Amino acid sequence: METLNQNDDYVKSEIERSMRHLADPKVQHAIKVQSYIRSYVTDFLREAGYTEIAPIIISPLTDPLNHPVYDPKIHAYGGDMWITQSMIFHKQIAVQELKKIFIMSPNVRLETEEKAGTGRHLYEFTQIDIEALEKSREEMMSLAEDMIIYTISRIKKEHSEELKYFHRTLPDYQKPFPVITFREAEEKYGKGFETKLSKDSTSPVWVIDIPLKEREFYDREYPDRPGILRDMDLIWPEGFEEASSGGEREYELSQILDRIHKKGQTEEQFKWFIELAREGIKLTTGFGIGIERFTRFVCGVAKIEDVTTFPKVPGRISL
Ligand code: AMP
Ligand code: MG
């Protein structure tokens, strides 16, 4: 990564930028909306029997991700640890005993510089990260739909003044959300279909049955359809693009090892997880939905940095 010279001028201009950002009424309103979303999602999940657990910040085990990022690696105590890129493995392990969990999970993903202008990427963000034991993909899709409908309807009822500020009208979305398979979406909209699908939709829409090469090793392959995963992405409508990714998870040791090998990854990298899988774990299913992207969609703003207090835009060292 290019080294930024954090000289006094740089620091001064970044601080001034932060202060201007925090003083911007649009940002202040969006931060309020984010706070309501956090609260309503939490109310909904507790009511649905989910226990909130504390986030993990550092561990020898984290999500490998399926796209290139700079490594958030720390050398300490004679070994390597990672800053959490996602809590996928911790979720899978904790839920074996706790059955239904969620985390307001801060993730650090040192995204590459070309993501700076997408309006959707920060290198520090928070996921509402949810996992349940022995539930199917379809059951978790239904939970996500209920959660989104509940959250949006409370914002409309209790904080219409915020939506008015943003000149935003949101319809009452109906369950079930439309579903399209990855293959159908590619046939209809072409490769890299997400933007077109999102612009073409008036409701959040599911993309299911994603091919193995598009995802990490841990999402579960259909037992009878090699190469296709029992996973799902949720796409926001109106061009706001991806809201969430999730799926059923691999839990059988032989399948986990096979998938790690197919990805060209090493068993060494995942030895903590492999050891646990060797002890025996059960099927879990879950998803993660970015709070900043959720807020951006509800407010209808173009830039994700406008919905958060100290935005971390890829490529830029900021407060
Ligand atoms: P993933 O499982 O990698 O799709 O991440 C789960 C969710 O976190 C995504 O669907 C987004 O809502 C959110 N997310 C992922 N990466 C970022 C990022 N760099 N900036 C903001 N939100 C993100
Ligand atoms: Mg995703």
Image: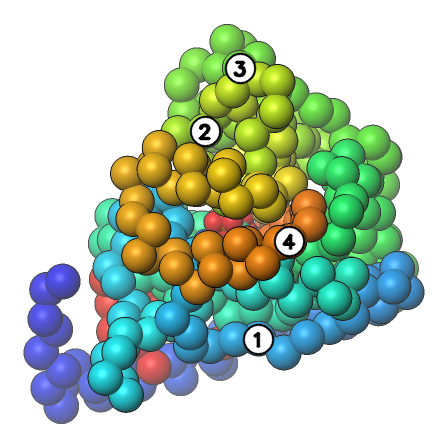
Check whether the beta carbons of the residues at disc 3 and disc 2 lie within 8 A of each other.
Answer: no
Residue 301 placed where, x, y %? Answer: 54, 53
Q: Is residue 48 above or below residue 197?
A: below
Q: Which residue is mark 1?
A: 55
Label 2 environment density (alpha carbons within 10 Å; few <14, some 14–19, many ≥20): many
Q: Which residue is mark 3?
A: 183
Q: Which residue is mark 4?
A: 281
Q: Can residue 37 be seen? A: no
Q: On the rendered image, what quadrant is the C terminus found in?
A: bottom left
- Which numbered disc flags the more N-terminal residue, 3 or 1? 1
Check whether the beta carbons of the residues at disc 4 and disc 1 lie within 8 A of each other.
Answer: no
Marks 3 and 2, how far apart in space? 12 Å
What type is the residue that disc 1 sits on? Pro
Camera-near label (3 vs 2) is 2
What colouring does the structure picture have? rainbow
**In the image shown, does 82 or 20 lie closer to the viewer?**
82
Label 4 environment density (alpha carbons within 10 Å; few <14, some 14–19, many ≥20): some
Residue 212's disc is 2
Label 1 environment density (alpha carbons within 10 Å; few <14, some 14–19, many ≥20): some
Q: Is residue 214 left or right of residue 248?
A: left
User: For the point 62% across and 54% down, which residue is it?
Assistant: 280
Check whether the beta carbons of the residues at disc 4 and disc 2 lie within 8 A of each other.
Answer: no
Q: Is residue 305 left or right of residue 82?
A: right
Residue most toward the top?
187
Q: On the rendered image, what quadrant is the N terminus found in?
A: bottom left
Marks 4 and 2, how far apart in space? 22 Å
Marks 3 and 1, how far apart in space? 35 Å
What type is the residue that disc 2 sits on? Leu
